[in-house]
Amino acid sequence: MRKIYLLLMFLFISLHINCREKDTLMIRYSDWDRQPIHVSTCSNFEVTNGFENEYIIPPEFADSLKSLLNNQKAIEDLYFPISCKLYFFRDDTVCHKVCMNRNYLIQNGRTYVNNDAIVSFINNLIARFPPNENSNNRFLPNAIGAGYIGGIKGLYDTLQKELNRMSATINYSGTIIMNISCKANKEGYTTHAEVKIAKPLQPSQKEYEIACSLSQFIKDNIIWNQDCDRNNYDNIIFSLRFRRVP
């Protein structure tokens, strides 16, 4: 009798764990056939073009969709505008993301061919479940600069420190506002950095020199968080104000 009781307890615990560990699905959907005005990627889909509706899907349907997403044909990376983004999450933590349009999909940083079965399954889920009226914009991309490995404050502290060093070297004093645009690879290393002077409207030679040196410093020294969904169309954009008194 004791053995039977222990066996039943083991089965109950196993079932409880399995239920608890099932993923819930969130769908953010725009339109399969809409061509976005701006470049949309997996990382910036919600911010760049927005989404029409958000849907929360129960775990049993999430498991079925995950099965459909397995064993797709992988192809070379390519750019395609995103129409739909899937978040599989557990305990309010994202454990898997998939971005797609009607023809292609991206998951785990790889590009695959999409198919009609996946599109139809998602269409049926959208038709079956009402839009989420209590969306709190969870899982949106990080704020500007938050992708830096040291956080937003760390990013600005590092750049301000370098600007202090640069300006002292060339004996510069004044106020300069710069707009900065970066690209990074999936591992987080900066591959391109462009620094444009917003103010003053007619920069001095020293200010041009500072902008050029800062661009090279960012490319050589600033490392962002790893992101397997990042591609060449993703830009990291932020502004920086620097002031040095004589």
Image (spheres, helix red, strand yellow):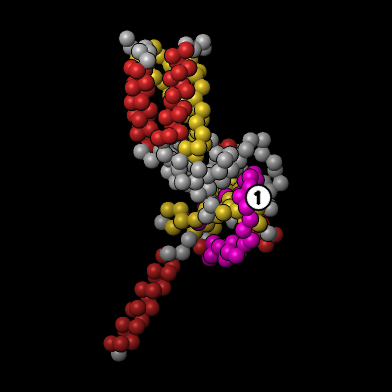
Task: Read off the residue under disc 1.
Answer: 101
Furthest residue toward front: 169
Residue in view at x 52 percent, y 55 percent: 108
Decide if residue 194 is in sight here. yes
Decide if residue 179 is in sight here. no
Locate the N terminus by quadrant: bottom left
Q: Nearer the viewer, residue 180 or 139?
A: 180
Q: Nearer the viewer, residue 180 or 88?
A: 180
| Figure check: 85 above or below 184 | below
Please state the horizontal and vertical placement of residue 6, each as a whole percent of the image.
31, 82
Residue in view at x 68 percent, y 53 percent: 103
Direction from residue 190 to residue 127 in the image, left or right: right
Q: Which residues are magenta?
A: 60-89
| Figure check: 4 above or below 173 | below
Q: In which quadrant of the rendered view does residue 224 lie? A: top left
Is 88 a magenta residue? yes
Please state the horizontal and vertical placement of residue 40, each as a whole percent of the image.
61, 40
| SS state under label 1 | loop
Is 35 a magenta residue? no
Residue in view at x 39 percent, y 69 percent: 17
Furthest residue toward left: 2
What amino acid type is highlighted by mark number 1?
A: Asn
| Figure check: 141 above or below 217 | below
- Disc 1: CA contacts within 10 A as few (<14), some (14-19) or many (>=20): many
